[in-house]
Structure formats: structure tokens, C-alpha cells
Amino acid sequence: MSSRPNRSPNPGAELLEARIVDALRHRVGKDERSAKPHDWFTAAVQALRDEVIDRWMDSTRRTHAAGAKRVYYLSLEFLIGRLLRDAMSNLGLGREMEQALRAQGLDLAALEDLEPDAALGNGGLGRLAACFMESLASLDIPAHGYGIRYVNGMFRQRIDDGWQVELPETWLAHGNPWEFERRESCYRIGYGGDVVANGDAVVWQPAEMVEATAVDTPVVGWRGKRVNTLRLWTANALDPIRLDAFNAGDHLGALADQMRADSLVRVLYPADSSLAGQELRLRQEYFFTSASIQDIMRRHEQYHGDIRTLPDKAAIQLNDTHPAVAVAEIMRLLVDGHGLEFDEALDITRRTVGYTNHTLLPEALESWPLPLFERMLPRHMQIIYAINSRILRDARRQGMSDGEVAAISLIDEGGERRVRMANLAFAGAHSVNGVAALHTELMKTTVFSSLHKLFPGKINNKTNGVTPRRWLQQCNPALTATIRDAIGDGFLDDAEQLSALNALAGDAALGERIAEVKRANKVALAAHLKELTGIRLNPDALFDVQIKRIHEYKRQLLNLIETVALYDQIRSHPERDWVPRVKIFGGKAASSYHNAKLIIKLAGDIAKRINNDPSVGGLLKVVFVPNYNVSLAERIIPAADLSEQISTAGMEASGTGNMKFALNGALTIGTLDGANVEIKDRVGDENIVIFGLTADEVAEKRANGYNPRAIIEGSRELHQAVEAISSGVFSSDDPHRYRSLMDGLYDHDWFMVAADFDAYAAAQRAVDQRWNDPQGWRRATLHNIANVGWFSSDRTIAEYAKDIWKV
Ligand code: 26V
């Protein structure tokens, strides 16, 4: 490079440019003249990847040499999003990449936009797994994520005439330059068949086998300290084609096994609305769990020999109950494979496994019809019975009541018998954690109260966190630069050092700069949304955002009804000094979730009416952003003024969007639910807007009868808004469209929309008041940014490492 000293002031950029051109020619197979933008994208990734690979191999060598304990994070979902900016930024090569591409006449941001989102998850649970993987690497903890390489991940959402339409996401259409297939790492996964005696022991003889093959993606930690592995399994038939059948003319039948294998890894279940009862889902769960456990145990034997030392060298964390069959699989391999005694095997299993619970909603707790489970996994069923008999015996010995014993059982005996995956995970783990303080307390007093009594001390709390690399540094570079100027670089490595900003709360110039950054982010978002939706937004309006999966408990409906009430108010009192607002909604509904889809349609109907009503004079705009995903979140969150976290108290386990918004200087309007409670504790009561019933009050109302009709009829604003929606004011093409949705509020209102409405509307008017005091708003913004560093997933992972994994 020294031969071309004058071409670029940055030798790193020159070297990278040369590597990109080399990759373009020799790996993509194009020259600079014929290369399309996609070719350049691939070449840029390939060039960066070389740097990643060197560090990856180095990390692996270091782990082997140290003989260190490893963390294994088993998750059916990893919502990792785009990887180019993440890898570039964590390696500190952002500037070099920009210059290298510019030298070739290319724009980095445009190339970044070509990368599809790896959307291998539904929502919070999957995104949490992605943040955890990044933090594990950043904290230099040897870790593997294990999951499924879905060919079609989360569906793409199109809005057709206001209705959600689900389309397959073809994220692999142009290939995936980040992944490495490891043909040598493959395992057989059995299904069905029989358990037969074999001397003193038993063996499972499955009727059917598929092969799991590893596909690895590197996960780059902050400053490139460590590169860990995300290992996703893909499926193949043992015999990809049955030639005899093919030659006999049965051309499709000959491929049936391969098609069955393909179907295992085809789609991610958008199962956020009700348990996907499909047999295929259980097959998927066992597929990835068994492959992962076999891989972990093979690695242990290879490096450490004695399987009895597994708990010293491996910590397996179950992300919800989806991999809970791991408990039975480890037991099976220890007992049937290694000949261990059952009780010793159970002890080893327990010392290795931890379980994280992410929801208390009864309809979301996984259980499988016992006949199905027994047919698919007969040996696992026996093992579950054997574990069950031990814990039920212990419960009875402790004098627990029949009701308590029934609640502890791994089998739900009420009606159709079912296998309870949460109880299995609880019984087979040494640690069971919730994801926010309130959620963890509710675990102890509600769903798991009997198991908590039997195993006191197992339940612990690990409040969720988010990675500040993606959710501050990468998505909001201007804010990051402003903070650096104010308090130096320390917060880049330790987000809690953001607290140094507190001392600068009176610094008007800093407040001004942060406000300018916010405005610029809003201008950029407005331009993007103009392109996506055609709606023009005023960047000086208050950007009020609710982006998350559409669920009745998250109460998008509360926000929409309040929007209608506000619209009504503005029209009735145009003379008042209204704060201009933009209401931004985004989120996917599970394809089978009727009311969630209707709520999307309602948002569109309300938007159409309000946005086209000249009498509101642009004071209120409503936008539903289609196809909400990680990349959209990265654009929207830095531009938000107000973060809507308004779930029915007691129902949102944690929330993680709430943390991302606060970190980017949005104020929260929220209930005392999930991690909102802890956000309030940290930012201070005066820097957050809390309203509504507490979890205790919700429980009390549900227990003692609650009359939503009386409440609706007693609240003029609410009544008018509900009646307007119900009578078709927003749906003249189909006046009854929202009748049953609104009747649901009158008749039962399980999610307490009516009970919280007046408090919510009042809180929104209090937000308006604050907005009219720009100094006060800026101060509150600053205190939010300053005090949410604790919600870094680095802190969360450090707690898991110390308390649960002992690494
Ligand atoms: C939710 C629901 C809600 C409606 C009925 C059926 C159903 C089925 C599944 C789920 C999702 C359960 C697991 C989950 O994604 N939990 C989320 O985990 C996040 C990370 O810990 C947390 O921030 C969210 O509050 C929690 O909903």
C-alpha cells in the first residue's frame, strides 16, 4: 500500500478497498464495470468477513486453550436483523468502509439497505436472543447460540386496503454471505418408533430419521474482542432421493423424505397469538434441541472426556419452553447412551440447565397433547413420567395439598391429558428466571407458586436489556457523537457511564444539540415514511410511537380510541392551542389472530379519515408503518418523542422496546408493567408519565367483578369515541366492521381498556403540557438517556454469567 501513499489519507480504507475489489472479482466473479449494487454488497461483506474470520478462529483457539466453561443459548428465535453495519461498527471499520466504497463511487448507506433483515423471530423474545448474543461476545464469554435456519423467517407484512396480508420472506434469495455450512457437524434426529429392552437398559428405535446440519454465522462483539458462533440447523433426509422409487416412475414419492425434512426448517411459526398446536412445531422443537444437545455433548466428550463433568464446562440456557425437551434429551443421552443412573443423570442435567420464562399468559404456556408427545417421542415420554414421579413424591412428602401437587405435575390431567413444558423446564433446571422484577414476583405468586414452594430459591430475576451498540451507537450516530462531545468515550464501553450526563442537565446548549439531533432524525424518518406510505409528516410535531407486535394486551386499541377522542376534541375546539401530533403505529399480527388484524385495519381506517380531514389542519396525523421489523425500528426509535408502553399491568413480562426508546431520548407514557417499573425507578418519577391500574388492581378488579359498560357510559369522551368506531364513522364502506370489537369492550374488556381510558387520556394531555415547555422536555429527555444505561444487555448478561452460568 505504501506505493500509493497519495490516493487516500487512510491506509485502512485503501486496504479494504483492495480487498473489496479482489472479492468482487475472485469470489463474486464480476469486474467493477459489470458489477451490480448487489455484487458490491456481497463483495463488501466478503472483504469484511475475512477480518471477522481471523478473529473468530482466534476466539475459538483461546477458548480451547483455556478449557473454559461455555454458554449455550438455545432459542427457537434469533431476530438478528442486518449484520453489515453491526460487524463493521463493532470492528471499528465504519469509516474505512465508507471511504473504500466512496473511492469506487458507491454509497455505503445504499449498500446497507440491500441487506435483507434476518427475521428469524417473532418479536421481543427473538430480539432479546440477538442482543444477548452480541453482549456475550462483547463481554468475551465463550458462547454458542443454537436455533433453526428458517428458509422463510417471519412473514413479510403487506397492507392491502388496510388489511394485513402475509407474504413469505425470502431473505435467502440472493444467498447469505454471512453463513458457513459445516457439513461435518451433522446429527441424526429420530421420531416415533418404539422403546425396546436391551439387557438391563432400553434403547429407542425411532421409526424415522432426519439429519441436522450446522450452518454457522459469526457474532462479532464490541471492538472485535471476541467472535462467537450462532449455529443454526438445517434439515436433510438421510436419503435425499430414493432411486429405486424414482426409477420405478414414482418421481415425487422418491423425494418425499427430503420434502419432509425441508418442511421442518421452512417457516418460523408466527405463533404469538395462540399456541401453534401443530405437530410440526413439536417436530421443529425436538429437531433443533436434539441436534444442539448432541453437539454440546459431543464437544464435551471430545475436549473433556468424562460426561459427568458436563455442568462444569457447559451452561445451557433455555429461551422459554420451546427447547424444554432438552431436559428429557440430556437425560436420555446420559442414561441410555452413557449408562448413568437416573438420579445421577437428573442431577447432572439440572446443574447444566437454566430456564427463562417470558410470559405468564396461560394461553401462551406450551403444552402438548400427551398422545402426540408419546407417539413422536416415546422414550422422552417415559423419562418425563420418571421425573414426574420423583417431584410428585417430594411434593407429597412435604405435605403439599392435592391442588398443589396437581399444579406441579408435568402432566395436565384436566380433560385431555397434556405435557406441560414449563413444568418440565422448571423441574429440570437449577435456575428459573423472569425477565423483569414485577414479572419475576408474579411468577412466584401465580403460575409457578406451587413449583416455587417445592423448589424455593430456584426462581430469580434477570431484568432484560438491549445492546447499546445497535440501539444507540449504530442506529443513532449523531446522538452518540453529541454524547461523546459532552462526556467523553467511556459510555461506549460501559453504558452506565451515560449517567455523567445527569450533571449536564442544566447545560442549555447540550439540550439544544440533542434536540437538533432528534429533529434531524425526525426529518429523515418523515422522508422515509413519505416514501413508504405517501403520508407527509411535520417534523416539528410530537412523534408519538407504538411499535410492537399487535396484541390485545399491548392495547394498541387504547391508543387508537384515545386518538379518536383527541380528533373529536380538536374538531370541537379548533380554537384551543393543540400540540401537533403524529401517531405512528407499526407491528405484525399473528395470521390467525382475528382481533389483532382488525386493529390494524382500524388504525388504517382512522388514519384515512383523520389525515384527510382539513378541519384538523394537520394538527393530528396517523400512520401505520407496514412490515415493522428490526431495520425499521432502527429508523423509528431515534426519531421518537414519546414511547407508548401501555400494556394491561401484569401482562407484559418486560418489554425491551421501552428501553430502546428511553436510550434514544424519548419519554415514556406507560403503565406500571414489565420493565417500565424499573425504568421509572431509574429515570425518576418526574421524567416518565405513568398512568393506570397497577397489576394488583387489575387482579383485584378481575376477581371482584368489573363493569366496563358502566365505565364507558360514565366517560363522555370514551363513550363518544367507542360509539363512533362502533357505528361505522371510520368504516362507512362496512359500518358494522368494528361492532363486535367494541361490543367486546362493553361486555368483558379483559384488557381493561375502559378502566384505564380516562387516566390515559389525562396522561396524554399532561404530555402536551410538558411539550409546551421545551426546556423541561429537553431536561427530561436528557435524564432518560443518562439513566437507562443499566438496561444494557451487557449488565443482564453479566448477571446471568455470575448468578446462573458461573462463567
Ligand atoms: C404471547 C402471547 C400473548 C397472547 C396470547 C398468546 C401468546 C403466545 C406467545 C406469546 C409470546 C411469549 C413469549 C414472548 O415473546 N415473550 C416476550 O419476551 C420478551 C423478552 O423477554 C419480553 O420483553 C416481552 O414482554 C414478552 O412478551
Image (spheres, rainbow, N blue to C red):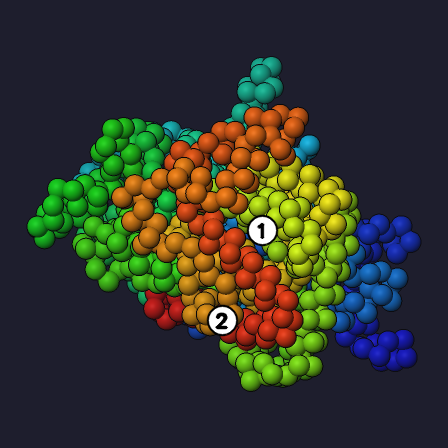
Q: Which residue is mark 2?
A: 686
Q: Nearer the viewer, residue 734 or 573?
A: 573
Q: Which residue is mark 1?
A: 547
Whether residue 53 is visible to the viewer of this picture, yes or no, is no
Q: Is residue 473 above or below residue 236?
A: below
Q: Nearer the viewer, mark 2 or mark 1?
A: 2
Task: Give the residue at x 48% y 58%.
Answer: 670
Q: Position of residue 721 (x, y in %)?
A: 55, 40
Label 1's element?
strand
Q: Is residue 416 left or right of residue 673?
A: left
Q: Amino acid at mark 2?
A: Glu
Q: Is residue 454 above or below residue 63?
A: above
Q: Nearer the viewer, residue 407 or 724?
A: 724
Q: Is residue 806 above or below residue 125?
A: below
Q: Position of residue 292 (x, y in %)?
A: 43, 50
Q: Is residue 573 left or right of residue 411?
A: right
Dividing the image into 4 quarters, which one contains the N terminus?
bottom right
| Circle 1 crowding by C-alpha within 10 Å: few under 14, some 14–19, many from 20 | many
Q: CA distance from mark 2 to mark 1?
A: 24 Å
Dividing the image into 4 quarters, which one contains the C terminus?
bottom left
Label 2's element?
helix
Task: Give the residue at x 57% y 52%.
Answer: 546
